[in-house]
Amino acid sequence: MSFDHLTTEQLRAIIHGKHPALVRGGNDWITDELAAVGLQESDEAADNLIRKMAKTGFGLCKARTRRGSPCRALGDGAGGRCILHGGASVGPVTLKGKQNALQALVRARLKRRGIDPDKL
Ligand SMILES: [Zn+2]
């Protein structure tokens, strides 16, 4: 789905549709998010961020970077942080980790059906 042809106002409507809980008494949280990272709505960077928020439905991470400025990446993980700042897990990476995850899944499904996996 392409958002390139949409105006900023249309994008805002999409974001608000995805975040009804974040529209607080007419308070525009998108403006707050942009202000928190030091951007004016007229900035090109702000327009790019609004497009990203509309596409994903995520807000900004806003964790402190090493420079001390707020992170401008989208935060979809724990506490709304980005993947660099303690956000979303990427799941098991190593073969051993994937095997462990699969084993735990099978054991859980057997237990749910009343089957003891240790007695198989
Ligand atoms: Zn971040």
Image (tube, grey):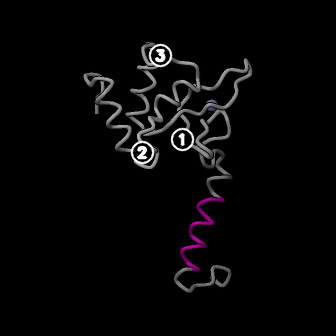
What's the amino acid at mark 1? Asp
Which quadrant of the view contains residue 119? bottom right
Query: Rounded to the nearest whole Å, what is the CA distance between mark 1 and mark 3?
Result: 19 Å
Label 1–label 3 contact, CB within 8 A: no
Q: Quadrant of ligand 1?
A: top right
Residue closer to the observer: 99 or 21: 21
Secondary structure beneath dot 2 equals: loop
Which numbered disc flags the more N-terminal residue, 1 or 2? 2
What's the amino acid at mark 2? His
The answer to if 86 sits in the magenta stretch is: no
Question: Does residue 82 sit above or below 36 in this rendering?
Answer: below
Please state the horizontal and vertical placement of residue 2, each as a whole percent of the image: 28, 29
**Residue drawn at (61%, 36%), measured in percent from left and top?**
83
Badge 1, how many Cα within 10 Å: few under 14, some, many 20+? some
Instruction: Give the residue at mark 2.
Output: 19
Q: Residue furthest front?
A: 25
Please state the horizontal and vertical placement of residue 93, each as a whole percent of the image: 63, 44
Secondary structure beneath dot 3 equals: helix
Please state the horizontal and vertical placement of residue 20, each as a whole percent of the image: 40, 47
Which marked residue is nearer to the observer: mark 1 or mark 2?
Answer: 2
Instruction: Give the residue at mark 3.
Output: 45
Residue 15 placement, left or right of 98? left
The region drawn magenta spans 100-111
Residue 108 appears in the picture as rendered:
yes
Instruction: Give the residue at mark 1.
Output: 76
Q: Which image quarter is the C terminus in?
A: bottom right
**Residue drawn at (58%, 19%), measured in percent from left and top?**
38
Please state the horizontal and vertical placement of residue 73, each as a whole percent of the image: 56, 28
Residue 89 appears in the picture as rendered:
no
